[in-house]
Image (tube, helix red, strand yellow):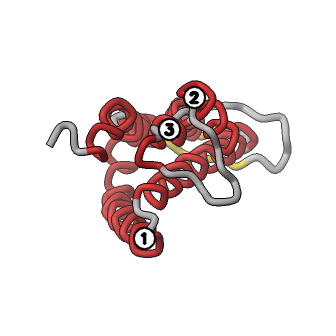
Amino acid sequence: MDHDYRVTAAAVGFTIDKSKGDDLAKFPIEKARLRSIWYFVTISTACTIGYGWTLQAKTVSCVSNARVRRYNGLTHQQHLAAPLILQFVCGLTVTGTFNICNTLIVDLHPSRPATASASVSIVRCSVAAIGVSVLQFLLETLRPGWTFTILGGLGAATAPMLWVVWVWGMRWRSGEER
């Protein structure tokens, strides 16, 4: 994030003042913070979808301790490496996305950073609670492949909202389009 901040500052001709701090009223902090989020959103979406399909796939493993699963009366062995790797990468990229968004929120509300961060956490946890409440139903109805495809699609559906903040965020802050 620091690298993105420096690159954005150089691109707009903004001088970084480490001793006094920067006046963000004239700096496109949205562009600086959201500069790398596109990688995280893309990778987390792909890993979420891939995770669901690897759980559903009939992969045969030569490892003796592979799990045996039963779907529609068929028994197959599934190696756990692919789902675990995808789960790790997905967790890593989602955490990166949360950190970028939380940093942007704190930057936008410097007088009350704890309140801003707590508000984000309340919304995030509420959405997670709703998701967990319907997850088992979706897994049983749609099976893992389509369930995680839908979840990945919901994650990708946030990209246009991030793009709107990227494009109009500074104008909204300065009051040009109120």
Q: Amino acid at mark 1?
A: Ser
**Which residue in the protein does label 3 denote?**
34
**Which residue in the protein does label 1 denote?**
111
Q: Identify the residue at horizontal 46%, vertical 65% (top origin).
A: 110
Q: Earlier in the sequence, mark 3 or mark 1?
A: 3
Task: Report, in whole angstroms, how far the alpha carbon at label 3 lies from the one at label 2.
Answer: 18 Å
Q: x, y percentage for residue 59?
A: 67, 31
Going by the image, does 79 lie left or right of 164? Answer: right
Task: Give the camera-side residue of 85 and 122.
Answer: 122
Task: Give the camera-side residue of 92 and 54.
Answer: 92
Q: x, y percentage for residue 142?
A: 35, 41
Task: Report, in whole angstroms, how far the alpha carbon at label 3 lies from the one at label 1.
Answer: 21 Å
Foreground: disc 1 or disc 2? 2
**Which residue in the protein does label 2 denote?**
13
Question: Could one spot residue 148 in this view of the protein?
Answer: no
Extreme-top residue of the structure: 11
Q: Is residue 119 above or below residue 42?
A: below
The crowd level at tag 2 (other Cα within 10 Å; few <14, some 14-19, many 20+) is few
Contact flag, marks 3 and 2 (Cβ < 8 Å) = no
Q: Amino acid at mark 2?
A: Gly
Q: Quadrant of the C terminus?
A: top left
Q: Secondary structure at mark 3?
A: helix
Task: Report, in whole angstroms, how far the alpha carbon at label 1 lies from the one at label 2.
Answer: 26 Å
Q: Identify the residue at horizontal 41%, vertical 56% (top origin).
A: 108
Q: Secondary structure at mark 2?
A: loop
Task: Give the camera-side residue of 172 and 79.
Answer: 172
- Label ID, residue 122: none
